[in-house]
Image: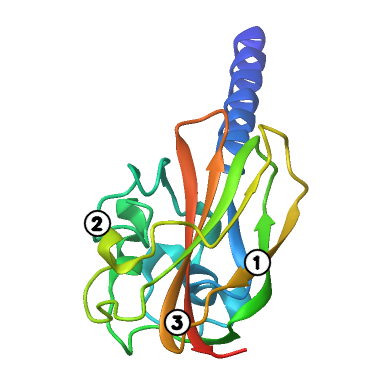
């Protein structure tokens, strides 16, 4: 009995460790703060009635390949992840806005654990995008306004990316995509921005 107990204990510990390793490879944008981040206590819960993402803004993960593949239209904000479908709700008033100026800005990804990385990319909505419908590819300029390639390297836990945001005014959505090198997934974060000129 004693040997059996020890074996089961070791197996249990190993399983727990494996589960932790799998779920810890996540990240979110905290500057400027993303929709998911502002749902969480770290973002003072400025976004309300967010569902599960309020507890894990770092977990908005889905298939990589945007815009050619990846999450379907209408599910871009959640990364196509059904656990975070509340993020796909979209009206002009639904989400807290962050004041951002066009021009040079630093985007900061906070990683709960590093992961081999292909790229970081940022997209922005068109001036005439549909504010009261779930986000689709038609709403975005599909050429990223900013991108950084990491060639499969493992990033540090905080990644800062210097970007030049195109000129926009009023409510716009910025989409950040962190593409992972050694899985089929990417992490998606949207930022609800109240844009002004430089």
Q: Secondary structure at mark 2?
A: loop
Residue 56 visible at all: no
Give me the disc on residue 89.
Answer: none
Label 1 to label 2: alpha-carbon separation = 25 Å
The residue that disc 2 covers is 73
Q: Quadrant of residue 50?
A: bottom left
Residue at position x 41%, y 63% in the image: 52
How crowded is the residue under tag 3: few (<14 C-alpha within 10 Å), some, or many (20+)? some
Q: Position of residue 81 (x, y in %)?
A: 34, 51
Is 64 placed left or right of 129 in the picture?
Answer: right
Label 3 to label 2: alpha-carbon separation = 22 Å
For marks 1 and 2 on the same chain, the one whose residue lies earlier in the sequence: 2
Residue at position x 56%, y 38% in the image: 180
Closer to the camera in the image, 78 or 169: 169
Q: Quadrant of the C terminus?
A: bottom right
Q: Position of residue 5 (x, y in %)?
A: 62, 16
Closer to the camera in the image, 1 or 28: 28
Give me the disc on residue 47.
Answer: 3
Q: Position of residue 173 (x, y in %)?
A: 42, 74
Cβ–Cβ below 8 Å for labels 1 and 3? no
On screen, residue 3 above or below 54: above
The residue that disc 1 covers is 163
Label 1 to label 3: alpha-carbon separation = 25 Å
Closer to the camera in the image, 69 or 27: 69
Closer to the camera in the image, 2 or 88: 88
């Amino acid at each position: 009995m004693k040997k059996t107990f020890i074996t089961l204990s070791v197996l249990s510990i190993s399983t727990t460790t494996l589960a932790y390793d799998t779920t810890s490879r996540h990240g979110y944008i905290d500057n400027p703060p993303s929709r998911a981040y502002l749902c969480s206590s770290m973002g003072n819960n400025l976004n309300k009635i967010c569902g599960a993402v309020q507890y894990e803004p770092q977990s908005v993960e889905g298939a990589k390949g945007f815009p050619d593949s990846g999450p379907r239209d209408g599910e871009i904000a959640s990364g196509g992840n059904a656990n975070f479908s509340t993020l796909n709700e979209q009206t002009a008033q639904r989400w807290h806005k962050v004041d951002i100026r066009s021009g040079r800005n630093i985007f900061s990804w906070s990683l709960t654990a590093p992961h081999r990385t292909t790229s970081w990319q940022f997209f922005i909505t068109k001036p005439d995008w549909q504010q009261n419908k779930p986000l689709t590819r038609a709403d975005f300029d599909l050429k990223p306004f900013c991108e950084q390639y990491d060639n499969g390297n493992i990033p540090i836990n905080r990644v800062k990316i210097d970007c030049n945001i195109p000129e926009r005014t009023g409510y716009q959505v910025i989409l950040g995509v962190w593409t992972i090198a050694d899985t089929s997934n990417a992490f998606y974060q949207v930022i609800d921005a109240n844009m002004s000129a430089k």
